[in-house]
Image (tube, rainbow, N blue to C red):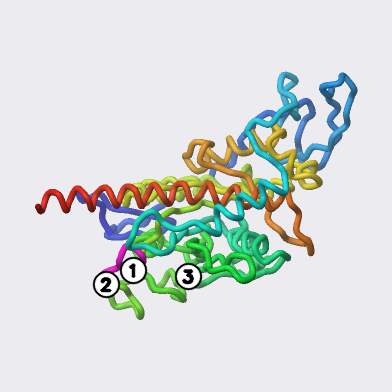
Amino acid sequence: MQKEGGEKIGFRGFNFGCSVPVTTTTNTTTPQFTIGTTSLINGAPSEITSKSSTGRKENRSSFRLPGMEVSSAAQPWLDSQWRDMEWTEEQRTNLMKTVSSYRPSCGEVTRAQILLLGPVGAGKSSFISSVQSVFNGRVTNRAMVGSFPSSFTKKLQPFNIHGQKGEDPTGVVLCDIMGLSDGEMTGLTLHDVLSVIKGHVSEGHKFSPSQPVTCETVGYVRRPSLQDQIHCVVFVVDASKVMSYPKSLSTTFQQLREHISDLGVHQVALLTHVDKVCPETGKDVTNVYKSNIIREVMNKAGALLGMSTSYIVPVKNYSSELNLDVNTDVLLLHAVDHILQYADLYFQDNTTQDTELTKFKM
């Protein structure tokens, strides 16, 4: 596969149009960054003492990630949120209405198709199930979730998010797909990812690195409509693994982002498992935007993805819980609303282009 101008694309050990295999180097030096007032090492929780706004000392447990150190200048907890969020039943209700009533701003499209991309185990399927759980009123696993070292999801699986009981389906489709992997014979290839985004791959297609998508592939869509295409890409990364992801994964993300941007598709990111890096947030999700730990991990995720943190939102998926939590719901729904804003930018861009083309023909 070639970009315009003849530049050849290599991706995760695969070459498209290249005779020389792509090689990557592994960075053996663990990145360092600092948070709070206690050394963070070996993944063990520690107690952090800080002063509250009333002057009283408070002990809050922190979490240690390998390669992380703490400076004496930064405080692990803030008195106010570093992003404004309202944690109320009313806010959950309003966000549910916003998502359930969403319809694409482009007349020829009835659903916004959102593709979730990320490493194996990052929480793509869990996010889909968690969002649907909010509208079901109970925790369910609609998207099959696994805990295997290899990707549990093998096929392209679109999930139309259904509204509350008795309501029509929303205009939101979350597409689950095989996870990115480091092995040369596992995971997705760049060619296949771009084929999905362009709308050439049909629902249920099973991916195999040894059998890339071609025009001869069963179900191949030769002339995809705007409805067949992906309208926003969401990268999903695990907050507890940000420091341990291999350098090659950052290269993978950079290549993906470059070529997806060439297609005019906007990208955002989800930072999952924030409760693992900050146990206090695990106990009370309203702490998520008061935690400097999560803020710094988000900065590292931004560096990994080559993306501004303004595009990244933290989420806590439902995993072992049996009952819903209002604040967890608010965080999940806020993430969906964030995604839909960028999907609408795609529709606005394409509507503008179509209008200009029509005027030119006249």
Percent position of residue 267, x then y? 44, 48
**Along the line of sight, which residue is nearer the eye, 9 or 50?**
50
Q: Amino acid at mark 2?
A: Arg
Q: Amino acid at mark 3?
A: Leu
Point 43% across, 45% down: residue: 254
Q: Are marks 1 and 2 in contact (CB under 8 Å)?
A: yes
From the viewer's perspective, is 322 left or right of 121? right
Q: Amino acid at mark 1?
A: His
**Along the line of sight, which residue is nearer the eye, 64 or 345?**
345
Q: Is 330 drawn above or below residue 142 in the view shown?
A: above
| Precedes in sequence: disc 1 or disc 2 | 1
Helix, strand or loop at mark 3:
loop
Helix, strand or loop at mark 2:
loop
Percent position of residue 256, x then y? 41, 51
- Residues in magenta, as a range: 223-228
Residue 189 position by quadrant:
bottom left
Q: Is residue 128 magenta?
A: no
Residue 200 is labelled as: 1
Q: What secondary structure is the magenta-colored segment mainly?
A: loop
Marks 1 and 2, Cα distance to the nearest angstrom?
Answer: 6 Å
Percent position of residue 352, x then y? 27, 47
Helix, strand or loop at mark 1:
loop
Give the crowd class for mark 3: few <14, some 14-19, many >=20 residues within 10 Å: some
**Along the line of sight, which residue is nearer the eye, 11 or 359?**
359
Marks 3 and 1, Cα distance to the nearest angstrom?
Answer: 12 Å
Q: Which residue in the structure is indicated by mark 3?
A: 156
Residue 222 is labelled as: 2
